[in-house]
Image: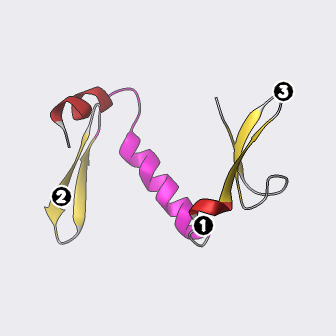
Amino acid sequence: MDAELAAAAGGQLKRSGRGRAVAYQGGPRNLADEVERAWDWWLAEERPELYDFGLTVTPDRQYAWCRDPETGPRWPAA
């Protein structure tokens, strides 16, 4: 990881061998924890592919969704 990027993010991921990594977290958000939760969600949802996701924009709101814009999981887009 670029040292400047690591400083801005407040953390680093380093390989520890045998396919494992160690996260050193800092700053306002624990990004490694967020990535781990996202990974677990992706596995639980049976690994949705790129085109399973979409974005809906209306005059009142914007949101990303997975698989179905009406019934699938949604996330607000800022």
Determine the secondary structure under disc 2: strand
**Residue 15's disc number:** 2
Is 40 contained in the magenta span? yes
Tell me if 75 is positioned left or right of 21 in this view.
Answer: right
Residue 45, percent from left and from top: 62, 67
Mark 1 vs mark 3, foreground winner is 3
| Disc 2 versus disc 3: nearer the observer | 3
Residue 59 got which mark?
A: 3
In this image, 14 relative to 37: left or right? left
Does the magenta segment cover residue 55? Answer: no
Residue drawn 51% across and 54% down?
A: 38
User: Which structural element holds mark 3?
Assistant: loop
Image quadrant holding the N terminus, namely top left
Q: Which residue is mark 1?
A: 48
Looking at the rendered structure, the kind of residue marked 3 is Pro
Position of residue 47 relative to residue 11, above or below, is below
Q: Main secondary structure of the magenta part?
A: helix
User: What kind of residue is marked 1?
Assistant: Pro
Looking at the picture, which amino acid does disc 2 mark?
A: Arg
Which residue is found at the position 85% from the left and 53% from the top?
70
Q: Quadrant of residue 18?
A: bottom left
Name the residue nearer the viewer: 14 or 52: 52
Residue 32 vertical placement versus 11 (above, below)? below
68 with respect to 8 (left or right): right
Residue 32: image location, x then y, percent: 37, 47
The residue at the point 18 percent across, 58 percent down is 15
- Measured from the top left, where is residue 60 in percent x and y? 83, 26
The residue segment tinted magenta is 25-45
Q: Earlier in the sequence, mark 1 or mark 3?
A: 1
